[in-house]
Image (cartoon, helix red, strand yellow):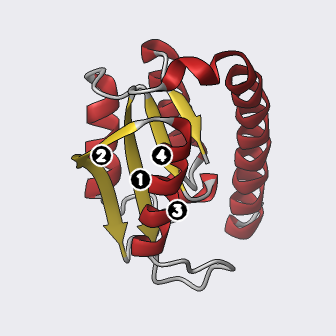
Amino acid sequence: MTTDDTDQQDEARLRRAIRASQAVGSQRVRSSRADWSGESAAIYCRISHASDDDQTGVDRQEGICREVAERLGLTVAEHQVFVDNNRSAWQRKRKRPGWDALLEEARQGRVRHVLTYHPDRLMRQPRDLEELLQIADDHDITLHG
């Protein structure tokens, strides 16, 4: 099996997991949205230098996420906006300081919601998704994308 085949399988696995998490998240949204007013939220924005289909800048991503947070009644503190500019998520060993800080904030239970412009801004590696979903499950964090 070639590296391209492995990457394609990883990407397909990731897409399936995202769809499954979105389905679960959408059920949660319908049942608890009214209870979210004033809850803490973190925003994660990322743009890589690679040519993706959507290169929405991190400032625009943050603006969109802030609009969603306001609409949902969520509170986003300035220190809970995490950005990785020019950080590809495809390279397994590439450090993403914003991502690492977001996960730590979530592990510490300091946020109830994580907002991102699109789920693919959060993670590109299946293990990223697994780690995020485990933290979200452990700390009752709702993911929005």
Q: Is residue 19 above or below residue 113?
A: below
Label 1 sits on a secondary structure element that is: strand
Q: Which mark is residue 64?
A: 3
For the point 49% across and 16% down, the residue is: 140
Label 4 sits on a secondary structure element that is: helix
Give the image quarter of residue 22. Answer: top right
Camera-side mark, 1 or 2: 1
Mark 3: which amino acid?
Answer: Ile
Q: Is residue 124 above or below residue 90?
A: above
Q: Residues within 10 Å of mark 1 (few under 14, many from 20)?
A: many
Q: CA distance from mark 2 to mark 3?
A: 22 Å
- Which quarter of the image is occupied by the N terminus? bottom right
Task: Kindly check if marks 4 and 3 are in contact, taking CB atoms under 8 A apart as contact.
Answer: no
Tag 2 or tag 1, which sits nearer the N-term? 1
Task: Kindly check if marks 2 and 3 are in contact, taking CB atoms under 8 A apart as contact.
Answer: no
Mark 1: which amino acid?
Answer: Tyr
Residue beneath label 1, please?
44
Camera-side mark, 4 or 3: 4
For the point 30% across and 20% down, the residue is: 109
Mark 4: which amino acid?
Answer: Glu
Task: Kindly check if marks 1 and 3 are in contact, taking CB atoms under 8 A apart as contact.
Answer: no
- Direction left: furthest residue: 79
Residue beneath label 4, please?
70
